[in-house]
Amino acid sequence: MDSYTNALYYLGNTKHSHPTALSNDSDLALFPIAWSGGHLARSDQSWPYTFLPGDRAWAKGVNGKWRRVQILDAGQLENRGNQFIFWYTASWMYDGVTFRKLFCPLEGNLKPDLPSIRTTLFEEGVRFQDTWWEDEAEERQERKSDACLIG
């Protein structure tokens, strides 16, 4: 199969990150490695989805923290031998500065912003950057340390 046909096959077997794309249970069988009963099993698991510009997602940065990002493009296809993968440009703000970086769902560092994904990340105890989870955890820690100082 030539590289163009391979790319078309890959694109035909990916699903958009929107929840409506998950309505058919037979679609889940296409990705037995990435899916465990239709749910993400762990945060570093690859996610074979395509994203659209404007989609919200969770991305893992080089600092090991996850952050909520916005997808800026329809993806850039890269040929890695016999496998085609998509890289997406995503942006986020931190301390008033807008950042942009490339992320790849098949490398496990980009996930759609779905309730099941948020639950898995939260239950796994992953580190978040600039989210209410991180703020709430820091606030609890401050209250705990204050209680120790007073008591």
Image: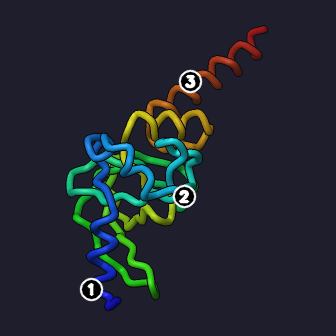
Which residue is found at the position 41% from the left and 48% from the top?
58
In depth, the one of 111 and 70 nearer the eye is 111
Q: Which mark is residue 33?
A: 2
Are the residues tagged 2 and 1 within 8 Å (C-beta)? Answer: no
Residue 20 appears in which quarter of the rendering?
top left
How far is mark 3 from mark 1, CA to CA?
52 Å
Compared to residue 19, the image places residue 28 above or below, namely: below
Q: Which mark is residue 139?
A: 3
Badge 3 amino acid: Glu
Badge 2 amino acid: Ile
> Number of labelled discs?
3
Badge 1 amino acid: Tyr
Mark 3, other Cα within 10 Å: few <14 / some 14–19 / many ≥20? few
Tag 1 or tag 2, which sits nearer the N-term? 1
Instruction: Determine which residue is flagged by label 1.
Output: 4
Which residue is found at the position 23% from the left and 65% from the top?
74
Which dot, 3 or 1, sits closer to the camera?
1
Label 1 element class = helix
Compared to residue 37, the image places residue 32 above or below, namely: below
Tell whether 145 sits left or right of 69. Answer: right
Tell whether 9 sits left or right of 48. Answer: left
Q: Where residue 2 appears, x then y in whole percent?
A: 32, 91
